[in-house]
Amino acid sequence: MAGPASLYLDPQIRDWVLFPITLVMILVGILRHYVVILLQSPPKKLPREAVREQRALTRSQVLRATSANSPIPPTYYKSISRHLYDAFEAGTYLKDGPPREGEAPKGPPNPMTDPAAMDGMMAGMKTQMVMMVPQMVIMGWINFFFQGFVLIKLPFPLTLGFKSMLQRGIETTDMDVRWVSSLSWYFLNFFGLNGLYRLILGGDNSADSSRDMNANAFAAPQAAGPQDFGKLFKAEKDNLEFAEGSYTWVGDGVEDRVLQRYGKA
Amino acid sequence: MMALMSLATALDQLSTFRTNNSRSSQETFKHASVIIKSSQKIGDDGWAVLEQLFLAAVDIGRLDVADECLKQLSTQFPDSPRVEVLTGIRMEATESPDVVLQYYNGLLEADSANAAVWKRKISVLRRTGKVEKAVEELSQLLDTIYTDVDGWLELADLYASCNQYTQALQALSHVLLLASQNPFYFQQYAETAYTAGDLPLALKYHLIVVDMCERDLDDIKTTPPTGLAVRAWMGVKLCARRIILHSPPSASGTAIPKSINVIEQLATERVLAAYSSSKRDKSAMNREVVVSWVGAR
């Protein structure tokens, strides 16, 4: 270890390397945010039948939610519950109508052949490209021009464990860990600028790229992707039967509750 | 400074109107005109104000102002479905219903699940007396978008206007499922059941309203009922009296409570308690009417 002032940094490094890297990364993040906004296609309009199919489950969920203390009297509850049960059984709410006799039930559509799913995937890939390309370019730029540069000295001491984090691209073993290399400065910015973006662009921005590192273009559409409503409806039938078993009407014994409160029971 | 102050209050007032969904067209028109005239930058809120001003202007018949608003809105948002609905509303003000219906049908063809347009169409149908068609469309709308409480209320109202109270009760039971925290809907259900002639059911629902309204009273025996509770107690009294006299059947199979006589007495007490204030003004007269009604058999 050398003395207190082992290394002097040229102020020009600060002016022409440190600040430009930071500035470029901030600007690229902001640019990306707006490019992503531009690329976003408007949500696709669903036809009536599709909306109906999507929301059919809410009906029974709403009914079930209060079934233990239901606001509606038994006859009405039963008729709604029966109606939904039969409709789920027959597949009335399916987008393409109830399945015909002898027709094999269709599995979930293949995302590669279904144009609707394909669109969603393309949108995911497009944003993904906007995320990845500029980062690769910046990294290439830093690697090409500023490889092995030491940019900044942290004002506090650190343990040796930080060496691989702060001195990436500089293969020396005996430099003080407080010195930060250009590539490490890039990574620090890459992961650390999100707070600044949130300040500039608001909470729901798409400028931060570190977030996308672990998300890939295919995972997102598949999670929210094509659902087999036929199966969901079949499962909901059982839930309806359970709920019917636990049904009580809020009007049961309401007169006793009121009378009791007035001490007349 | 004064201008700034009034601008701030006007904006404040308008946003309260927006959140509370209150109509108050005259007020809205006054406040919004202040804001528009002040011609200051008010950001994105300005477009909401413009929409509000448009609706208020149509409501009070200032179509010139409405046209100006609509022009600005449609230049800012050329293909917005929301502006399309506003255009439809503007057409409803002057064009014949057939033209408007045609316009709405065209919009629905482009986007069949646009609930706002669909509802406008239903309201035009109802207004022009095609109740049957309106009921049909509204049922279809609710079949698609189940969670629309206002839609169910409108359907119940449509049925009630045709004296089909059982169907109205069915529609209202969906309202209760969707908004089971609102005692006013229960009260509506109770009164519809009463009109339908299902007295035991009406009694039950009046009691549920009472139960909901007076749940948080500390000293329940001495506090007179207020607000909705008075109406509910009167309903209890009315139903209980008629049940004791006639013991009517219930279409929904609701049993008549065993303690019906005690309930009737309690209801009498509560109704009288609500009108027992010692003030000597109009309430004295009201009290006499209520006392004679309560005493009458």
Image (cartoon, helix red, strand yellow):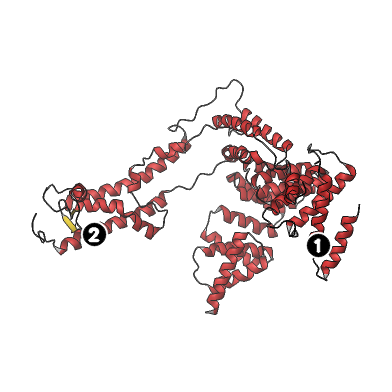
* Residue at 77% over, 53% down: B232
Under mark 1, the amino acid is Tyr
Instruction: Classify mark 2: residues with Cα within 10 Å, few (<14), some (14-19) or many (20+).
Output: few
| Spatial CA span between label 1 and label 2 | 80 Å
* Residue at 58% over, 45% down: B111
* Residue at 69% over, 66% down: B60
Q: Nearer the viewer, residue A29 or B243?
A: B243
Q: Nearer the viewer, residue B153 or B223?
A: B223
Q: Which residue is mark 2?
A: A20
Mark 1 and mark 2 residues within 8 Å of each other at the beta carbon: no
Q: Chain of mark 1?
A: B
**Same subunit: marks 1 and 2:** no
- Secondary structure of the residue carrying tag 2 is helix
Q: Chain of mark 2?
A: A
* Residue at 89% over, 56% down: B295
Residue B65 lies left or right of residue A170; in this view the side is: right
